[in-house]
Structures are given as C-alpha cells and as structure tokens.
C-alpha cells in the first residue's frame, strides 16, 4: 500500500512539473496492440503498458526515448464515435518506440493507455500533449 501511495505521489509531482515547464501541443493519437517488445528504445526490456511510440514530430533521432508525455483526449476524429473521450481523459506515457512508417498519429499509445482516455472503438482521437 505504501508503494502505491509513493507511486501516486510521484505521478502527481511529475504532472505538476510537466504543466509548469512544458508547452501544450495538439495532434492525433492512435493506438497499437501487444506485443510491445522489442522496442526501438529498450529492445526486449519490459517498460510496462503505459507506453507510446513517437511519430517523427516527437522522435527527434531517438532523443524522445524515455521521455514522459501527458496526453489529453480532446475529441473524436470521426462521426462514428462522436464523443470518444472517457475516464479522466488524461494519461502519462513513456516513449519506448518509434512509430512505423505510415503512422497516422502524432503519438501511438499502447492499447491500455488509449483505453484509459478514450473508447478504443474510435481508433483515432484529437489530443493535446506535453512533455
């Protein structure tokens, strides 16, 4: 239980620091499904499921590896799921991979991270994000 409280406190502090030091950007989020390894940043080292792959806009020749991003669901991108945002609408993810060629999103969230902020049936959402 104490470990859970410490993790929650760390996450809250990290979110506060992000909001004080980072600019808000807008983009598109998609999601990918397991297996999540190997990844471009960590090979076969498991980084959990609160992870994402960076598009060229974020990748920066691999400098994005290990960076944390706060992603906020803003709205849907299609009429099929007009109100996809759900839950808290915010998730913090670690960049562990590079989005493959042809990636449609600015950030490609793990399926689990996407499901915390949006209905997976929507597939693609409008987001704001910050490091």
Image (cartoon, rainbow, N blue to C red):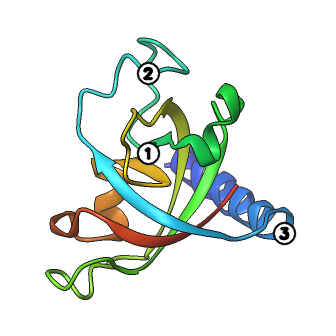
> For mark 1, does the 10 Å Cα neighbourhood hold few (<14), some (14 to 19), or many (20 or more) residues?
some
- The x, y position of residue 115, in whole percent, is 28, 61
- The residue drawn where x is 49% and y is 32% is 98
Q: Give the side of residue 50 with respect to residue 115, left or right.
A: right
Direction right: furthest residue: 21
The residue nearer to you, when weighing 55 against 4, is 55
Would you say the residues marked 3 and 2 are in contact, meaning their CB atoms lie under 8 Å apart?
no
Residue placed furthest toward the top: 44
The residue nearer to you, when weighing 1 against 34, is: 34
Residue that label 3 marks: 20
> What label sits on residue 50 in the rendered view?
1
Q: Secondary structure at mark 3?
A: helix
| Mark closest to the chain's N terminus, 1 or 2 | 2
- Label 2 residue SS: loop
**Crowding near pointer 3: few (<14 within 10 Å), some, many (20+)?**
few
* Chain-order first, disc 3 or disc 2: 3
Q: Is residue 70 left or right of 50 when viewed as pictured?
A: right
Q: Which residue is mark 2?
A: 39
Mark pair 1, 2: CA separation: 14 Å
**Residue at point 52% right, 17% down?**
42
């Amino acid at each position: 239980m104490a470990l859970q409280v410490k993790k929650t406190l760390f996450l809250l502090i990290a979110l506060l620091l992000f909001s004080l030091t980072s600019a808000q950007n807008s983009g598109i989020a998609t999601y990918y499904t397991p297996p999540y390894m190997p990844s471009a940043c960590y090979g076969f080292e498991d980084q959990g499921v609160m992870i994402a792959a960076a598009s060229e806009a974020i990748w920066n020749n691999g400098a994005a590896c290990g960076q944390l991003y706060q992603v906020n669901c803003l709205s849907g991108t299609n009429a099929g799921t007009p109100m996809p945002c759900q839950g808290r609408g915010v998730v913090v993810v670690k960049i562990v991979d590079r989005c493959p060629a042809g990636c449609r999103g600015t950030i490609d969230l793990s399926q689990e991270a996407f499901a915390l902020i949006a209905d997976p049936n929507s597939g693609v959402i409008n987001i704001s994000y910050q490091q």
